[in-house]
Amino acid sequence: MASIAGGKKNAWKLYIILLVLAYIPFLGLLLSNSAEPRIAGIPLVWFYSMVWVLFVFTLIVIVYFIDRKVGGIIE
């Protein structure tokens, strides 16, 4: 039982780290707020936003599977 409780405490730390990573790229939007640079014909801001949505989705899926493996942090 002690190992499960320790795993849940470590899972909380990992959850926080992964979900904080989701907010860091918002700072990049401040630097790329223009329509002129384009990637594959798409304005840089739109491209950056699409890539970031996929990255955040991946982070949330990782947190979900870690939570299932640990057995959930809420009992």
Image (cartoon, grey):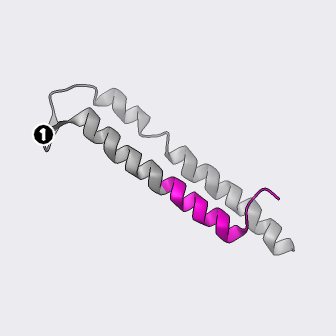
The C terminus, quarter of image: bottom right
Q: Relative to 33, is 56 above or below?
A: below
Q: Mark 1 — residue?
A: 41
Q: Residue at x 68, y 61 (%)?
A: 11
Q: Residue at x 35, y 27 (%)?
A: 30
Return the residue nearer the eye: 43 or 31.
43
Tell me what residue is drawn at x 33 percent, y 47 percent.
51
Under circle 1, the secondary element is: loop
Whether residue 58 sits left or right of residue 31 in the image: it is right
* Magenta segment: 59-75
Q: Is residue 66 above or below residue 15?
A: below
- Residue 8 spot, x, y in % from top left: 75, 63
Q: In terms of image quadrants, where is residue 10? A: bottom right
**Is 47 included in the stretch rendered in magenta?**
no
Magenta part, dominant SS: helix
Query: Along the line of sight, which residue is nearer the eye, 28 or 44?
Result: 44
Q: Is residue 69 left or right of residue 74?
A: left
- Residue closest to the far right: 1
Residue 74, percent from left and from top = 78, 56
- Look at the image and tell me in which quarter the N terminus lies: bottom right
Q: Could you tell whether 23 is left or right of 10 in the image?
A: left
Mark 1 surroundings within 10 Å by alpha-carbon count, few (fewer than 14), some (14 through 19), many (20 or more): few
Q: Is-magenta flag for residue 69?
A: yes
- Hey, which residue is sitting farthest left in the picture? 41
Q: Residue 50, image x and y in percent? A: 32, 43
| Residue 4: quadrant of the picture | bottom right
